[in-house]
Image: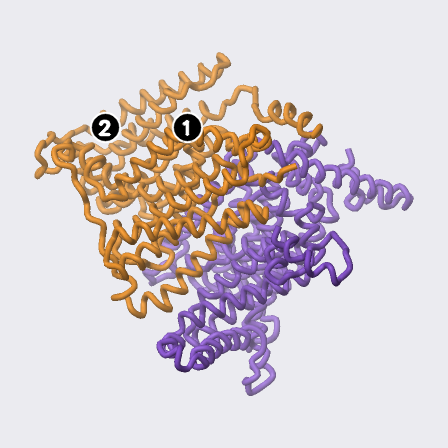
Chain colours: A purple, B orange
Amino acid sequence: MSPQENPPVTPDTAGGQPPTRRAAQEAAREEERRLEAAAETGGGQVPPPAVPASPAALAPAGPGDEQPLMQRIMTGNALVAVLAVVLSLILGGLLIAVTDEDVARSASYFFSRPMDTIGAAWSAASGAYAALFQGSVFNAGGDSFARMIYPLTQTLTVATPLICAGLGVALAFRAGLFNIGAQGQILIGATLAGWVGFTANLPFGLHLLLVILAGMLGGAIWGGLVGVLKARTGAHEVILTIMLNYIAINLVLYLLSTPGFQRPGSTNPISPQLEATALYPPLLGSGFRLHWGFVVAVLATVFVWWLLNRSTVGFELRAVGANATAARTAGVSVSRGYILAMAIAGALAGLAGVAQVAGTEKVLTSGVAASFGFDAITVALLGRSSPWGTFAAGLLFGAFRAGGVTMQASTGTSIDIVLVVQSLIVLFIAAPPLVRSLFRLPTPGAVPPARRNRKTAATGGAA
Amino acid sequence: MSTVTTAAPGRSAAPAGAVRSWKTPILLAVLAVVALLVFGAGAPRNNVTFRLSDPNDAIVLPDLVLPAAATGWLTAVVLAALAVLAVLAVRRGAGVPVWLVAVFAVLFLIGFLTWVIGSANNPNVALYGLLAGSVTLAVPLIFGSLSGVLSERSGVVNIAIEGQLLFGAFAAAVAASVSGSAIVGLFAAALAGVIVSFLLAVFSIRYIVNQVIVGVVLNVLVSGLTGFLFSSVLSKDAETWNSPPRLPVLSIPVLSEIPILGPILFEQTIVGYLMYIAVAVIYVALFRSRWGLRTRAVGEHPKAADTLGVNVNRMRFINVLLAGVVAGVGGSFFTLVSVSGFGRDMTAGQGYIALAALIFGRWNPIGAFFAALLFGFATNLSNVLSLLGTPVPDQFLRMLPYVVTVFAVAGLVGRSRAPGASGIPYVKG
């Protein structure tokens, strides 16, 4: 059927006459639309068996831009996104203000001098956010241009693993799989990459290439395992990935206590330094921590975009994600889809591990993955599982993370506030009607005259 | 409408997998071979002592002493025989009987225990403590998975169990510290669970946001919120905010003196007793009451329920809130029973394990109860073994509960079927 005819990946059709090619493309699109439509109607009533949460659950709101919820998001997309960020920042600011000590002190005489409290609250919240900005984008107080833009490069450095792992989660989403296992995949990828990095003795270039491949392989094994188990036994991938995360961290801890991995002479779970030939070279000179891993992350984004939107494999993955039963009927192997999706997702998470071990940390520890694997889930959700959306979300969360460190150091505001703001953003972006009703925005779809719109919007948005 | 009717038969026919499944017999055979090699051939040459009761108990049972090698060989041979039986059953075309898998699991456990404790530096273990500790560790898991049962049976996937537990723990600690009463903390925990549930319900039922997404995000939100408040408020003045009194252990006279079972059943805190009550009540209510029938109907086939006049979304809303009460109370275990005080991210992924227990227990309160007990046992066993000093590296022991889960989810339980409409929002019309 048409999945096999999907033109861009079959060069022989590309060589043929353009009209047929276009026709085939149209047919493929048509097929895709049908599949996704089937996912809506069928998925609304009868879920695929044995998979409670994932494919059917993700179909209505998760991936795919053709679904009604997505359409609603698309209509007021940019505005809602901006408002969601603003709203989350306001709520986060309130939280900072409420827990601030100066605010608490001035609140004790609130009724005699209310402006003191408000002023203290404002300075607490704005101070924290200013530090956040200063630590993530631009430091106006830097003594040279390099110092001024240093925060931005920090953001990009932190964003690198977030983007890679986020792409992995997003890709699995599109195939209808809820991949919570990025953390374990990063760890195993980083372990294998690190091992190649500090044991092999190879020339520059080849060594780094091997490190990258080893990292991807490690992640692909750890992710592919989930795919195989799900395809063969019907086990739930949410459970499998969570369990494999725990197994991975214990496995890494064990390996780091064996002579093959542990730094000679050390009793701590830490590996030797990676060889210089195994490291990503710095991207902007040695004064910055930003390394070529970021470029790899950009390439990975391009690759995922191509894979999902221009390749047969990607088409099949999306078909499986939209409606596994329909895909099976159309001749797509669902098992193969699950295995492939999880293996590729794992390889992408493995790239995040490489970025950490061969770029930022330069050494393997059990904490090499930080919490990137879990943050990647929110990144993919915020990016609505599209490759470039994930890229942008990765940058935003990278900024939050990099700035959060500065914020905690300079104003004493706990970096946990970043988690609160991040999760609020995702919640609000996922529920545009809520944001619309809060800001009295018109509901999309109906196009009444602007004046009347205002009145109906209040009820329409809240309904 | 027509798509629905045509899709249904195709769906139900596809997954059943009428092909005979060799998965279980193969797994059993592999495990039997492992047992022969490890428990039998690799058995240590000494005796293993299982202490059945504390010397200070009213009724003292004698210690159970087993020769490790003989026990190992015996269990391994029986396991092999069971595996052969399973192969024969599948060849006949019948499935592997459930009792066979159950007996196999219990025997494997006995063989494993004898082998691993026999190989320890000190081959002597307090079985009563091992079991009682397992139940204690399982308490939050059981509450968590019951919360999942309530919510998923009505058709709302509850990934937010982790968040409900954590927020419950946080609220219990703060409320109990401020009021000075652990009971107030218990109520606050329930309320906190409801707050998380309310958000889950509003976003997933009213705004039709994907339920898994809302759950994951709520977990992050609660983790960030409690972490933020912990570092900016609680840790600055722990005396006021984070020094909750503990719930007292209430032992029932006479009954708590029963060997082994007494401490497990009749020497618990309020939270422990509530756990047993909750399992029983939810089981009976779910399968024997009008409310339960409606809940299951709404979760399996909301359209049919709606046609018969059940308000689907209201039913779901109520169930999700109830789930919050249950998980919140479970969260109080962390701060009022196990440790006195809140710590950052102290639930440490227990909510996700509860989710696994829920699926392992096939969305049934009793099943979830036993699945959670299994996790508690595996966790406690790894704790006990690392104290005894075994040849198995510590990290592998700590992996044990998770490896067991993977095997359980992928192998022994087979395809567990979720409630039909779990995860799918209901839009009328």
Q: Is residue A397 above or below residue B184?
A: below
**Residue placed under numbered mark 2 in the picture:** B69
Where is residue A295 drawn, in percent x and y?
64, 64
Does residue B238 sit above or below B366 in this rendering?
below
Chain-order first, disc 2 or disc 1: 2
Q: Which residue appears at 58% of the width and 26% of the height?
A: B15
Residue at (60%, 57%) from the top-left corner?
A429
Q: Where is residue B3 shown, x and y percent of the image? A: 70, 30
Write down the quadrant of residue A280 in the picture: bottom right
Judging depth in this view, the residue of A278 and B151 nearest the camera is B151
Quarter that holds the N terminus of chain B: top right
Name the chain letter of the residue that bears numbered label 2. Answer: B
Q: Position of residue A139 (x, y in %)?
A: 56, 80
Q: For residue B396, what is the image quadrant? A: top left
Amino acid type at image mark 1: Ser
Q: Nearer the viewer, residue B178 or B113?
A: B178
Residue denoted by label 1? B289
Proximity of marks 2 and 1: CB atoms separated by less than 8 Å: no
- Between disc 2 and disc 1, the foreground one is 1
Q: Is residue A130 left or right of residue A455?
A: left
Classify mark 1: helix, strand or loop.
loop
Real-space Cα separation, disc 2 to disc 1, in angstroms: 52 Å
**Most distant residue in the top direction:** B92
Q: Secondary structure at mark 2?
A: helix
For badge 2, the amino acid type reads Ala
**Quadrant for the C terminus of chain B in the image:** top right
